[in-house]
């Protein structure tokens, strides 16, 4: 069984920074893509950023230049460094991974971590 566990959310003032972490635990798995999504109240969940196992990254236009996604493959961990935060970044942030187990690939989600940016 694979689990994704996020940490690092919290309350911050506009212009501040937060760093989110997501650890994938379990055994016998491989990771092809890990990413961060967010969902604000009344809105659909949206992709924030993702990173492939080879290091290729992808960002939503709204966070380009402010957020940085990175990974530590040895620790099965992905990070999201969020700088210059804005009130509109307020949301629950979810970690998502495309996890390979044997010949199959599954999508796993964490439970989410709240990020609140005050103006």
Image (cartoon, rainbow, N blue to C red):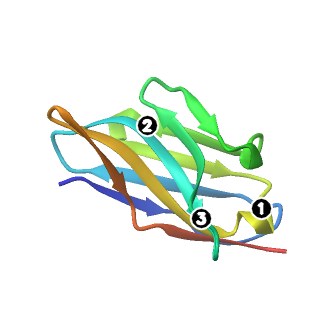
In the rendered image, which residue does mark 1 sit on? 16
**Between disc 3 and disc 1, whose residue precedes?**
1
**Between disc 1 and disc 2, whose residue precedes?**
1
Tell me whether circle 3 and circle 2 mark residues in contact (CB < 8 Å).
no
Looking at the image, the residue that sits furthest to the top is 54
**CA–CA distance in space, label 1 to label 2:** 24 Å
Tell me whether circle 3 and circle 1 mark residues in contact (CB < 8 Å).
no
Which image quadrant for residue 106? top left
Q: Nearer the viewer, residue 87 or 18?
A: 87
Tell me whether circle 1 and circle 2 mark residues in contact (CB < 8 Å).
no
* Left or right side of 20 for 91: right
Task: Please tell me which residue is depicted at 37% across the width and 52% down the height of the picture.
Answer: 23
Which image quadrant for residue 76? top left
Q: Assign the C terminus to one quadrant of the image.
A: bottom right
Task: Please tell me which residue is depicted at 43% across the width and 51% down the height of the picture.
Answer: 96
In the rendered image, which residue does mark 2 sit on? 72
Residue 7, image x, y percentages: 47, 63
Secondary structure state at the residue bearing disc 1 = loop
Residue 82, image x, y percentages: 68, 52
* Left or right side of 85 for 38: left
Task: Please tell me which residue is depicted at 17% across the width and 54% down the height of the picture.
Answer: 1
Alpha-carbon neighbours of circle 1 within 10 Å: few (<14), some, or many (≥20)?
some
Q: Nearer the viewer, mark 3 or mark 2?
A: 3
In the rendered image, which residue does mark 3 sit on? 44
Secondary structure state at the residue bearing disc 3 = loop
């Amino acid at each position: 069984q694979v689990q994704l566990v996020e940490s690092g959310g919290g309350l911050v003032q506009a212009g501040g920074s937060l760093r989110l972490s997501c650890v994938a635990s379990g055994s016998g798995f491989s990771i092809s893509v890990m990413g961060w999504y967010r969902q604000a109240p009344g809105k659909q969940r949206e992709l924030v950023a993702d990173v492939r196992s080879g290091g290729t990254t992808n960002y939503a236009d709204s966070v380009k230049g402010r957020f940085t996604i990175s990974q530590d493959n040895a620790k099965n961990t992905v990070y999201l460094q969020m700088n210059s935060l804005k009130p509109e970044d307020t949301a629950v942030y979810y970690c998502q991974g495309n996890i390979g187990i044997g010949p199959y690939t599954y999508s796993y989600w964490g439970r989410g971590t709240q990020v609140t940016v005050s103006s």
